[in-house]
Amino acid sequence: MSLFITSLNSGSNGNCYYVGNEHDAVLVDAGISCREIEKRMVNLGLSMSRVKALFISHEHTDHIRGASVLSKKYRLPVYITPSTLRNVNIHIEKNLQQIFTANEEVSVGSLSIMPFAKYHDAADPYSFMVGYNGIKIGVITDIGKVCEQVINHFRQCHACFLEANYCEKMLEEGGYPIFLKNRIRGGRGHISNAQALELFLAHRSPFMSHLLLSHLSKHNNCPELVHDMFIKHAGTTNIIVASRYKETEVYTITKTINELPVRKPNVMAGLQLTLI
């Protein structure tokens, strides 16, 4: 049994991530239009009939732009926190609003979704872990810093959409005003390529098969640059840079033999867990 994942769009112009199995799927954020989401899913051979819910990470426009129309058209429940709901500038029908709480698992069909709090300059921002049959996918973007919550969940990922927003040198030497540079790198904005790579090197699980580098800055990053940074350390992990212009391909995520020593309830498993 597998999970299928794709980035439908990733960047400050809009974010939308798909995670699902043969029967059920969820979208995390809908920062591009309903029409674009539909078109890109058709391009990939994915059906909206599988999508059972939309999860909203926070209220910034690049994460909610298409949420209202998408929810209304497909009668999708929108999982959102009360604080985020108060701050969104779109209308979500009352009967489609579903409230979630930090660290309380939500079941959507055969999928389980675990929301966890993060540092970001929004009212009540969250990242998510989507699970099925022991497989876990992280959607970990818009994080101001790599906190313990991020580390603990990243270590469990079979695949992850991980933010690598900016190159520190490009940001420093670029044309952004100083207040915006400080907002981005100040601990509640975004993490850099170097910070994302440090997380990957220190805490990647032995069974992580795919890493989708996400939410790249248009002006302060370069897809080739960040890909080259990660690929030399990738090992058996596939490195993909999610585009701000089009969908990625659909990736199939499964459990692997590498997990067996970690999962066995004996002394050796405990040693393995300590080393990860």
Image (cartoon, grey):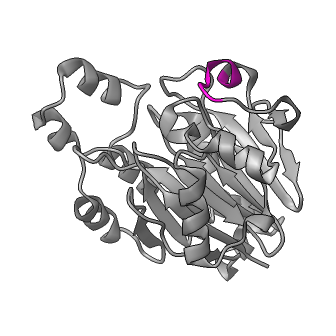
Q: Which residues are magenta?
A: 84-90
| Residue 245 percent coordinates (x, y) | 38, 60
| Residue 125 percent coordinates (x, y) | 60, 29
Quadrant of the rendering where the C terminus is positioned: bottom right
Q: Is residue 69 magenta?
A: no
Is 148 placed left or right of 197 in the picture?
Answer: right
Of residues 165 and 244, the one nearer the viewer is: 244
Q: Relative to 200, is 104 above or below?
A: above
Is 230 placed left or right of 45 in the picture?
Answer: left
Q: Residue at x 82, y 33 (%)?
A: 97
Q: Residue at x 40, y 45 (%)?
A: 13
| Residue 263 percent coordinates (x, y) | 77, 67
The answer, for residue 276, to whether it is visible in the render is no
Quarter assignment of residue 83? top right
The answer, for residue 83, to whether it is visible in the render is yes
Quadrant of the rendering where the N terminus is positioned: bottom right
Quarter assignment of residue 188? top left
Quarter assignment of residue 232? bottom left
Q: Is residue 87 magenta?
A: yes
Q: Relative to 39, is 190 above or below?
A: above
Q: Residue at x 57, y 35 (%)?
A: 148
Total count of labels: 0
Of residues 254 and 184, the one nearer the viewer is: 184
Is 7 placed left or right of 28 in the picture?
Answer: left
Q: Residue at x 25, y 18 (%)?
A: 179
| Residue 208 percent coordinates (x, y) | 57, 68
Of residues 246 and 232, the one nearer the viewer is: 246
